[in-house]
Image (spheres, grey):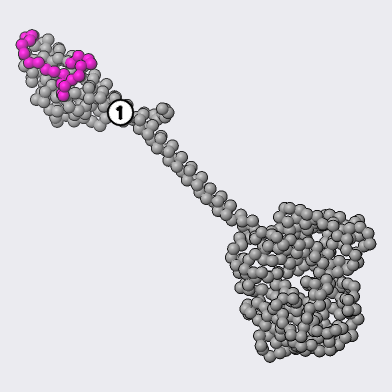
Amino acid sequence: MARILIDNTSERVEGPTWTSFHHETFLGGSMFLQKTSNGFPSSVGPFSVTFNGTSIALYGDTNSQVNQTGTVSIDGGPPFPTATFQGLRPFSIVTQFFQSPTLPDTTHTITVADLVVALDYMVVTAGNDTPLAQETLIVDDSDPAIVYDGPWVQNSSMLVFPPALPNGAQHEFLPFGNATHGTNTAGASATFTFTGTSVTVYGVIHDPPALGSLYVRYTMDGFPTEQRYYPTAPRPHYPWYSNTSLATGEHTLKIEVTDTGDGDWNYTLDYITYTPSFDSLGSKLSTSPSGTYGRHGTRPALIGAICGAVGGVLVLVLVGLVIFRKRVFLRTAYSRPASVERKDRRSSVFRALGDSNGPLALNDPFQIQGLQPNERAKGQFPALPPVSTVTNDLSDSASVQRMPPGAAPADSQAYRYNRGSGSTDAGARIQRLEQIVASVQRDLQVAGSSTMSERQPPPYKEDLP
């Protein structure tokens, strides 16, 4: 909630037969009253106030010498009676004398008539759309926006008796909101946070001691300044502190009592006024950070932290992908030479024997052409044909010559057959052929064991380049 303070000197107050009476004991230094030469008249003409908001309260001094009941009209409506004020009091009391009902949040005009009164100030309750630019907002000492620390005492029954006015009139003053907060202990403090361009702290001075001084430190946004006070007379609406040159934005004021002269002095806080730097309560709420994020803008920092966390996760994912691809590359680079080497060894060992027409033509380590119907069992190599089968297909002049080690065989020429003149000794030829067959069987067994071991991949070992 925000409340707008309107002084009686405002142009929004109109009364043709009214004038201002100036004295420091009144808020703003003046009161608005009927033109007379010596105090209150017996009757007054009407006055009106135009304002924007949802309600209005009037503060002033009703005549203590007569019983009276005035009338009030709102927005040109029918007048209705105000409260009845009892006369025959020893002193006039400056206090609230009218409170309007709740109204729509728009422009209104209130007219007061038939009431002998001196108008001091007005307080308007603002709605969400009430214009607040260039207005003065008032904050009571009991408002939660003021945070107290230390031994503060709330006084709700204090009257202030300043000296008589120059015209001889004597007044009593009730503080704003009918209460104050006071302390006489060094170290007690109060903190007020606001959004505006100026601020003034008002209090009450009553029965000041004859000796000593009061010292108070005011810290605005971390910059302290200390003031010394030694007033000599009671006074309401006393301006303890004022700063009218603040930058637009949020500010924090800390009030700290530093010396009370052994407790003889009392620092009393009544209300604080400030000029807002926002256009309306609605605009302030739409631009202020949520309470869960703090008032100094922690939400952008939290968003930044979230973005940073997401970025960190992305970096970790990218690093993981790089490591994974590197491992795959190293594994491929490790296994490729071995497979090529085995393939080359297989090809060199199991070249086809003889030409394509011979019964011993061997084009694949797992298939021997021309030896059907013999079939190899799973995991085994086929047995070679009997020697007699081979000898029946060879002429007397045939001989088998094995390629020398290291020589590059041509296709299907791991073993070469030469048909020509040779020894006529059939037994020698058969013995030689048996030796060749035994040698081929050994080669097949060696190649088979190598092929079977190839089916089991070698253990993985990552060697970094």
Q: Is residue 347 magenta?
A: no
Q: Position of residue 50 (x, y in %)?
A: 68, 80
For residue 174, above or below residue 230: below
Determine if residue 234 is in view: yes
> In terms of depth relative to the viewer, which is nearer, 103 or 375?
103
Q: Is residue 411 magenta?
A: yes
Determine if residue 454 is in view: no
Image quadrant where one finds the N terminus: bottom right
Q: Residue at x 79, y 78 (%)?
A: 20
Q: Quadrant of residue 369?
A: top left
Q: Quadrant of residue 214?
A: bottom right
Give the residue type at disc 1: Ser
Residue furthest to the bottom in view is 78
- Compared across the picture, whether 146 is left or right of 389 comes to right
Mark 1 lies on residue: 339
> In terms of depth relative to the viewer, which is nearer, 333 or 131?
131
- Residue range in magenta is 403-425
Q: Residue at x 79, y 88 (%)?
A: 44
Q: Residue at x 69, y 59 (%)?
A: 246
Q: Magenta segment, principal secondary structure?
A: loop
